């Protein structure tokens, strides 16, 4: 007899969708769409933090770029370390807080990819 497979679920971190997935598949790992995380990160840096375009792009590239933390993290622990180091090395408190808020989602994604 085959054991049922637990699906890996993806979303854009929308609260109602996350709740529905948790109720329907409580044991399933949940990923947050990296494209949506990148967009949210960019919009927050622009609209709430007020970071100039060039500086905003530097942070986005550091995290999401082809040579960024997500692309080159060895595993979820390495990504967590790199994000923590990035947060600690910035002098902008708002950027630091944003990185700290996004880190758990990015690290969780790395566990399943």
Image: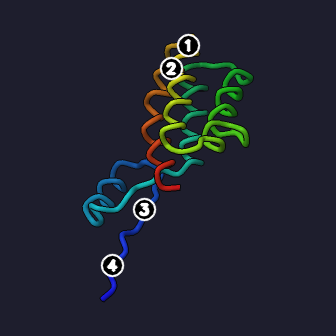
The label on residue 9 is: 3
Residue drawn at x 43%, y 63% as measured from the top left: 8
Q: First in sequence: mark 4 or mark 1? A: 4
Q: First in sequence: mark 3 or mark 2? A: 3
Q: First in sequence: mark 1 or mark 3? A: 3
Find residue 40 and report its horizontal and vertical position in percent. Answer: 54, 38
Is residue 37 left or right of 72 when viewed as pictured? left
Q: Secondary structure at mark 3?
A: strand
Is residue 27 left or right of 33 when viewed as pictured? left
Distance of label 3 from label 2 (alpha carbons): 29 Å
The relative height of residue 43 versus residue 8 in the rendered view (above or below) is above
The relative height of residue 99 versus residue 2 in the rendered view (above or below) is above
Distance of label 2 from label 1 (alpha carbons): 6 Å
- Do the residues bearing badges 1 and 3 touch, measured as CB atoms within 8 Å? no
Residue drawn at x 72%, y 39% as measured from the top left: 67
Find residue 62 and report its horizontal and vertical position in percent. Answer: 67, 31
Find residue 104 and report its horizontal and vertical position in percent. Answer: 42, 38
Distance of label 2 from label 4 (alpha carbons): 42 Å
The label on residue 92 is: 1
- Do the residues bearing badges 3 and 2 touch, measured as CB atoms within 8 Å? no
According to the picture, the residue beneath numbered tag 2 turns out to be 96
- Do the residues bearing badges 2 and 1 touch, measured as CB atoms within 8 Å? yes
Question: Which is nearer the eye, 7 or 81?
Answer: 81
Q: Secondary structure at mark 2?
A: helix
Q: Of discs 2 and 4, which sits in the foreground?
A: 4
Q: First in sequence: mark 2 or mark 4? A: 4
Question: Which is nearer the eye, 112 or 46?
Answer: 112
Q: Residue furthest bottom?
A: 1
Q: Quadrant of residue 85?
A: top right
Q: Quadrant of residue 20?
A: bottom left
According to the picture, the residue beneath numbered tag 4 turns out to be 4
Answer few, some or many: residues within 10 Å of disc 4's Cα (few below 14, many 20 plus, some between 14 and 19). Answer: few
């Amino acid at each position: 007899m085959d054991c049922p497979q637990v699906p890996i679920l993806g979303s854009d971190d929308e609260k109602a969708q996350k709740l529905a997935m948790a109720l329907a598949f409580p044991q399933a790992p949940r990923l947050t769409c990296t494209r949506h995380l990148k967009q949210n990160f960019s919009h927050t840096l622009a609209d709430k933090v007020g970071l100039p375009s060039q500086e905003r792009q530097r942070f986005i590239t550091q995290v999401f770029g082809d040579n960024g933390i997500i692309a080159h993290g060895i595993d979820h622990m390495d990504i967590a370390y790199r994000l923590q180091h990035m947060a600690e090395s910035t002098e902008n408190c708002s950027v630091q807080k944003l990185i700290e808020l996004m880190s758990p989602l990015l690290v969780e994604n790395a566990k399943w990819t």
